[in-house]
Amino acid sequence: HQKVRTGYLELAAQNPARFRILDATMELERLHEEIATILEPYLNQKN
């Protein structure tokens, strides 16, 4: 599992617009707010 995490962190560092790193130890409500904030621009886009 550590190799997968390391690989993901490397990808995220190389392409921060595509990957997000979230702290899953934070309070659930705060994590939900952070996810919603990240996704909101994509959900509001018109194709």
Image: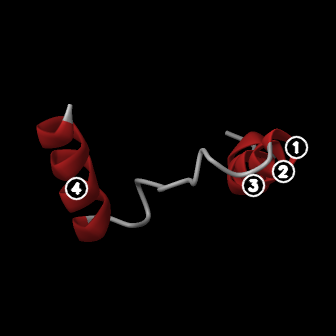
Badge 1 amino acid: Glu
Res 17 quadrant in image: bottom left
Task: Look at discs 1 and 3 and give the one toward the viewer.
Answer: 1
The alpha-carbon separation of the residues under discs 4 and 2 comes to: 24 Å
Pointer 1: what residue? Answer: 29
- Position above or below: 2 against 22: above
Q: Nearer the viewer, residue 3 or 46?
A: 3
Which circle's residue, 3 or 4, is located before the other in the chain? Answer: 4
The 10 Å Cα crowd at callout 2, few under 14, some 14 to 19, many 20 or more, is few
- Position above or below: 23 against 46: below
Q: Are marks 2 and 3 in contact (CB under 8 Å)?
A: yes
Q: Helix, strand, or loop for circle 1?
A: helix
- Residue 30 picture location, percent across and down: 83, 52
Pointer 4: what residue? Answer: 11
Q: Nearer the viewer, residue 11 or 5?
A: 5
**Circle on res. 34:** 3
Task: Look at discs 1 and 4 and give the one toward the viewer.
Answer: 1
The alpha-carbon separation of the residues under discs 1 and 3 comes to: 9 Å
Which circle's residue, 1 or 3, is located before the other in the chain? Answer: 1
Badge 2 amino acid: Glu
Badge 3 amino acid: Glu
Pointer 2: what residue? Answer: 33
Q: Are marks 4 and 2 in contact (CB under 8 Å)?
A: no
